[in-house]
Structures are given as structure tokens and as C-alpha cells.
Image: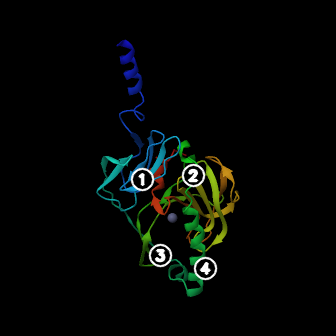
Amino acid sequence: MIVRLFLLAFLCSFPAYADDPVSLSGGFIPGALIIGQTAPGNTIAVDGDPVRVSSDGKFLIGLERDAKGSLALAVNGAETHQYPIEKRDYEIQRIDGLPSNQVSPNPETLARIKRERVFITDARKADSLNTDFASGFIWPVIGPISGVYGSQRILNGKPKNPHNGVDIAAPRGSEIVAMGDGKVVLVHEDMFYTGKTVMIDHGHGLTSVYIHMDTLHVRQNDTITKGTLIGTVGKTGRTTGPHLHWGVTLFSMHLDPMLVVGEMPKP
Ligand SMILES: [Zn+2]
């Protein structure tokens, strides 16, 4: 009897492996990244779609900008929970004085934009087995936030896509570091919109992108760790001044970097 009680207490001390099939870190807020843990071998589905579970039971859930209602999580095919999604409002951001070719590009420029977009969309398709995301994230640059995620952008008076990252204002030449461990999946010297561009794969479809850079300090396929110097702040591509635009995506879904990494440390 004593042995049996002891065994029961032992099993209950591992909630992710016994009564509770999942543990989740992160809130159900539009733009959030949730890192989940379940018992190895379990399958997970979110709103009916299976998600990759690592051999040690880690998985990722993203909430898109306009996520509403609730999210259904199923473990081993059985729905175990409905999580209500918080409401979120976004700013309206107006930017004027951009060269007109950058707001309404001519056909030649449009062709170039289309060619270059493929590099980014291809990099975001990577569904790598690695779980680099598990070692956590840091801010790539410390400085004033000059643009937030989700805001509706009006460029030279024309409504455009919502801003899908965070802008950090910092002087040209400020160091940019990798937000997490990963592999460099794109280094581009000169893209029309994004200028000098770096993308890092953090595993399971999670990538980060760093754009408008002045100099590049990594090469494609480099394996890097959180905090590795990847380049410096610049104003290459379509921008009105030096800053880092930093984006985080789960496959094609844009997440809010501020929710992914947490509060910025004081300079
Ligand atoms: Zn931006």
C-alpha cells in the first residue's frame, strides 16, 4: 500500500506526462507564439490541423493578427481544450514622403519585387526538425520602438498591408544580433523593399527576418547561436531612415516579435 501511494505521488509530479497531456507557455493573444510540451509520441492538432511535435514532445502554435474566437487543441485525436483568444486592436500608421516608385512600382520594378519575394516565401516554408526555439529569444537591437506589429499602414495616402514586424530605431552601424539559436537560411545583398536582408530558421517553421541592414556578418547556411552578431543597422531598401525592421513568422503567419521575445531590457 505504501509503495503504491509512493508510486502515485511520483507519477503526479510529472504533469506533462501524466494527467495533463500538454503544458503551454504564452498567452492566447493575436500575434502570439505559444511553445507547447507534451509527452513524447503524442500527436497534436490545432483547429483540426496537425502540428509538428519533436521527438521530445515540443511543438509550436501561432496566432495570426486577426485571430478571433477560440482555439481548439486536440491531443492524440481527442479535443482536450478550447482556449479563448483575447481581443486586440491595432494602430493606424501614416508614412508620407516616400518616393512614388516605391509606393506604386512600375512594371519592371514589380517583376523584380516578385522575383525577390520568392526567396523570402521559400525560406518560410522550411519545416526543419530542429528545436532551436526551445533555448529562448532576445531582442536583436535595443532602442526606441518606431513601429509596432499589426498597425495599418497608409503610405503616401494609400492603404497598404498591415505592418508585420517591429521597427527599432537605432543609429546606422548599431549591432544586430540573432534573436535565437538557428540556421541562416537567407542572406541577400540588395532587395527592393528590404535592402540587405537576413533570415534565420529556428525550427518547426519558425523564422526571423532582419532587414534594411547596412552590413552583413553571416553567410547562408551558417549555424548560429542566440546573440551572434549578424549585421548592422542601416537604411537599405524602402525606408526613410536607419532602423531595424524585425519580423517573426511561423511558416507564412506573421507573429508579433514583442510577444515572442517579451519586454525589451533597459539599455
Ligand atoms: Zn517595419
Examine the rendering and report whether any part of residue 48 can be seen: yes
Say few, some or many: other residues with alpha carbon within 10 Å of mark 3 (under 14 / 14 to 19 / 20 or more).
few
Asked whether disc 4 touches disc 1, contact meaning CB atoms under 8 Å apart, the reply is no
Gap between marks 1 and 3 measured at Cα: 30 Å
Residue 266 % position (x, y):
52, 44
Is 152 placed left or right of 191 in the picture?
A: left
Quadrant of residue 151 within the rendered picture: bottom left
Residue 204 % position (x, y):
53, 53
Quadrant of residue 174 within the rendered picture: bottom right
Q: Which residue is mark 2?
A: 202
Asked whether disc 4 touches disc 2, contact meaning CB atoms under 8 Å apart, the reply is no
Image quadrant where one finds the N terminus: top left
Say few, some or many: other residues with alpha carbon within 10 Å of mark 2 (under 14 / 14 to 19 / 20 or more).
many
Q: Which residue is mark 4?
A: 112
What amino acid does circle 1 point to? Ala
Gap between marks 3 and 4 measured at Cα: 23 Å
Residue 97 % position (x, y):
50, 77
Q: Which residue is mark 1?
A: 32
